[in-house]
Image (spheres, rainbow, N blue to C red):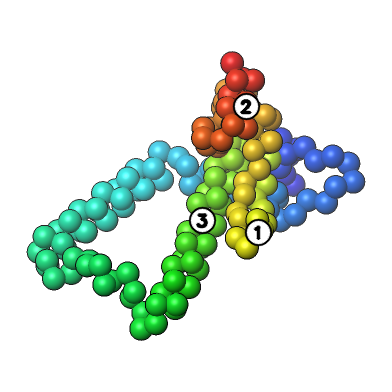
Amino acid sequence: MDSPDDVGAQPPGTRMSWVERVPQGVVKPLFGRVAWAFYIAAALTAVLLLVLLLVLRPDLRPIFDDIWFLTDPIWSVFAVLVISAIIAAGHECWHWLAGRALGVPARFRVSRRGIFVVFETTRASCLRCPDGHGTRPCSPVSPSTWCCLLRHC
């Protein structure tokens, strides 16, 4: 059974979804020193291979015609939209996992704004960060995050 600090305080009578049940111990190794060393090594290897490949094989350099990588331009646009949505979901999921690794009861949700699908990690939970952790899971870009930072000062 998870401790109340691990899962996050829920108001009485509210249902907790699977997203809020991910224990801190499961995701904490994804943000440790060994994991960050692996991420840095993977990024450096990818950059090195890309540079070497483009230097050794100049015929593989992209040109303006490569924007339409499928036979029909509409399918190319659709593919880029789908791939972008998958990358955005992964990006926000990583913010949520970072919050869970610190013990923040963060929430991940998918919603819609107009015709666009939006992936969100709640910011309200950064006010309840454990002592000594500050607001690391929050991005210092949005106004709500600046309010969080000012409250901790």
Percent from the top left, x then y, of residue 83?
A: 46, 66
Residue 13's place in the image compared with 84, above or below, is: above
Furthest-top residue in this view: 153
For marks 3 and 1 on the same chain, the one whose residue lies earlier in the sequence: 3
* Left or right placement of residue 17 versus residue 63 in this view: right
Residue at 27% over, 56% down = 46
* Camera-side residue of 103 and 122: 122
Q: Which mark is nearer the camera, 3 or 1?
A: 1
Q: Amino acid type of disc 3?
A: Ala
Bin the neighbour count of mark 1 within 10 Å (Cα to Cα): few under 14, some 14-19, many 20 and up. Answer: few
Residue at 13% over, 71% down = 59
Q: Amino acid type of disc 1?
A: Gly
- Under tag 2, what secondary structure? helix
Furthest-right residue in this view: 13
Residue position for label 3: 88
For marks 2 and 3 on the same chain, the one whose residue lies earlier in the sequence: 3
* The C terminus: image quadrant: top right
Residue at 50% over, 68% down = 82
- Under tag 3, what secondary structure? helix
- Under tag 1, what secondary structure? loop
Bin the neighbour count of mark 2 within 10 Å (Cα to Cα): few under 14, some 14-19, many 20 and up. Answer: many
